[in-house]
Amino acid sequence: MHSSARSLSAGPPRTPGPTGVQVHDLTDLRAGDVVEIRRWDTVHFHGAVDVVCPRLGVLWVLDGPLCERTLVHAGEYSLWRIARPVRAR
């Protein structure tokens, strides 16, 4: 495993935030999309998509306050695209 990737078993589970839209096809995701990675309605990771590899069925997500790069095997989780909050000008 690459040193910048970490295991998906790390970190405490979180409750789902905004509902968002479930993503069934990795080709629908782009770098910068905000996603929640869930299993059994528990959020394991939440962050911005860094890289998507649809042929391999994986993506990297920048997770948490330190934006740790996490490798996600999409077949093991449900992926949800979350709308970015609108910033006040």
Image (cartoon, rainbow, N blue to C red):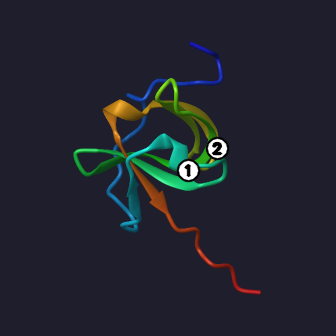
> Circle 1 is placed at which residue position?
47
Residue 11 image offset from top left, x and y in percent: 42, 36
Residue 55 image offset from top left, x and y in percent: 52, 26
Q: CA distance from mark 2 to mark 1?
A: 8 Å
Taking the spot 47% from the left edge, 58% from the top edge, the residue there is 81
Taking the spot 50% from the left edge, 23% from the top edge, the residue there is 56
Amino acid type at mark 1:
Gly
Q: Is 78 drawn above or below residue 58 in the view shown?
A: below
- Horizontally, residue 23 falls left or right of residue 41, namely right
Give SS at disc 2.
loop
Total numbered labels: 2
Amino acid type at mark 2:
Cys
Residue 7 image offset from top left, x and y in percent: 46, 24
Residue 15 image offset from top left, x and y in percent: 32, 56
The one nearer the camera, 38 or 9, is 38
Residue lying at the far right of the rendered structure:
89
Few, some or many C-alpha atoms within 10 Å of disc 1 (few <14, some 14-19, many ≥20)? many
Residue lying at the far left of the rendered structure:
40
Taking the spot 56% from the left edge, 47% from the top edge, the residue there is 64
Residue lying at the far bottom of the rendered structure:
89
The one nearer the camera, 38 or 11, is 38
Residues at discs 2 and 1 in contact (Cβ within 8 Å): yes
The one nearer the camera, 79 or 69, is 79
Few, some or many C-alpha atoms within 10 Å of disc 2 (few <14, some 14-19, many ≥20)? few
First along the sequence among labels 2 and 1: 1
Give SS at disc 1.
strand
Comparing labels 2 and 1, the label whose residue is closer to the camera: 1
- Horizontally, residue 68 falls left or right of residue 22, namely right
Q: Is 81 drawn above or below residue 63 in the view shown?
A: below
> Circle 2 is placed at which residue position?
67
Name the image quarter holding the C terminus: bottom right
